[in-house]
Amino acid sequence: MKVDKETYYTPVKNGEKGIEENEQNVKLPLIGVRHWQVLLLFIMVFTAFGFRMILSVAIVAMTDPNASTNPNVPVYDWKDKGSILSAFFWGYIWPQVFAGYAANRFGAKWFLIGTMFVQSLLGISTPLTAAYLGSAGMCMSRALQGVCQGFIFPSVTHQLSQWVPHEERSRLGAFAFGAGPFGTVIAMLISGQIASSWYGWPLIFYIYGGVGLAWCLLFTVSGSNSPAVHPTISKAEKFYIEQSLGHTDEKPSHKVPWISIFKSVPVWAIFVVQLGNNYSMWTLMTQIPNYMSHVMNFNIKDNSTLSALPFLTLWIMSFMFSFTSDSIINKKMVTIGTSRKIFNTIGLVVPAIALIALGFTRSDQPAQGVILLIVAVSFNSACMSGWGLNHMDLSPNHAGTLMGLTNGLSHIAAIIAPLTVQYLVRDEEDPKEWRVIFLLAASLWMLVAVAFIGFGSGEVQPWNEDSEEEKKEKA
């Protein structure tokens, strides 16, 4: 039975949990507990992506004696900037599978709080790390921050699978994950302004560390693993969520079908598309400020503002794509799988075309370069309604584990991306050397788009549920 978002009726079957007879026909509030939980996840992802991105701008100021108006702000002569930028992912890839399993097994709340707390302390200590431990210390600090953030996407995916009804998955999922590009925008905007001010780049890390600690306190008080254990959620909203998701267990425990997962073609399709997308997107996310500075010749203030524009449009367009995706699915115009493939293709092919054009843009065409970057990055937001939600389509019971598996392994590409630029771009002011980088990223986007069309799926997989033997063991 389909549940209406405004009002629903609850014919309770024998032995089925439901709301009381006199509570039927209850209207759900416009803003419910599920929306508050998603907002908390939005703030956390926003802060986490800020931590990821501030170094991409800050490192320009950290190595430029003219960046700040204050001559006492520390400046370093580092030749291994690519290694520092990629170090985050040295740590990021390792905890992902465990994080997904742990979130499914124990709930995500305290993993999110603990890792954000440690991340915030490491961020606050960045100026001291740079001063006393140099670039090697920065690599170590960023790798540890990567370990902390390795818990985020598997845990957020698990939280969404517990809190978001199918009818709202694209919208609320895109809202939560859309905090990433929005956090990137704000990080780039304020980082450039702060780095060029009297306070210099250290203040950037103090601000984000403080925001992270504040979020830990907020989520400790208000966060919850699922509707089943939330202390104040209404019976109406709780039943609406659980009827849509198909479970009412307080602590659902499902044995992870590892063999079936590794044999699943749709899971491999997600991994392949995520691998290619991560390489291309992290090439842009780590190198746009560098490209703007050395090829387009923008100063630190203009650089940060213009570098943020592509991610601002990405964030805005993610809502357009997610609402369209939900609409065509709910109206049964296409299947979930077809919708995922349509938006995934838009999110990969259009950016690839823009990057090819960018590769042939000259240094005396800055406006064209900025426009093409905006197109490349912003249209990639369609992927949030493509492979980005596909883990929950394939297996709601193991969504966190799937996200941990594919997200962790695919971010090997994010390690390689800045190192590839460091190796191939010897003269950072030569557009021809950057052309190779952009054409490589575009080619990968095209290839993985085709792979997902051929092998992706939107159907719940048979291994999502326990086998009959496992059900008997539980009984």
Image (tube, helix red, strand yellow):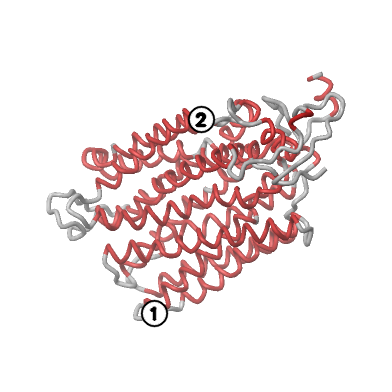
Q: Identify which residue is drawn at 60% across, 55% down.
A: 384
Q: Nearer the viewer, residue 411 or 46?
A: 46
The image position of residue 457, as x and y in percent, is 75, 53
Give the quadrant of residue 47.
top left
Q: Nearer the viewer, mark 1 or mark 2?
A: 2
Q: Are marks 1 and 2 in contact (CB under 8 Å)?
A: no
Instruction: Say what amino acid the circle numbered 2 marks.
Output: Phe
The residue at which mark 2 appears reads as 111
Q: CA distance from mark 1 to mark 2?
A: 47 Å
Residue 262: which quarter of the image? top right
Q: Residue at x 61, y 45 (%)?
A: 30
- Packing grade of label 2 (10 A; few <14, some 14-19, many >=20) is some
Residue 270 vertical placement versus 313 (above, below)? above
Residue 218, by quadrant, is: top left
In the image, taking residue 467 as reference, residue 385 lies left or right, namely left
* Residue under the point 17% across and 53% down: 198
Which residue is outermost to the front? 22
The tally of labels here is 2
On the picture, is 292 further left or further right than 269?
A: left
Q: Which element is circle 2 on?
A: helix
Q: Earlier in the sequence, mark 1 or mark 2?
A: 2
Residue at 33% across, 61% down:
304
Viewer-closest of 30 and 179: 30
Mark 1: amino acid: Arg
- Helix or strand or loop: what does disc 1 sit on? loop
The spot of residue 249 in percent (x, y) is 71, 26
| Mark 1 lies on residue | 362
Seen in the image, is 30 located left or right of residue 123? Answer: right
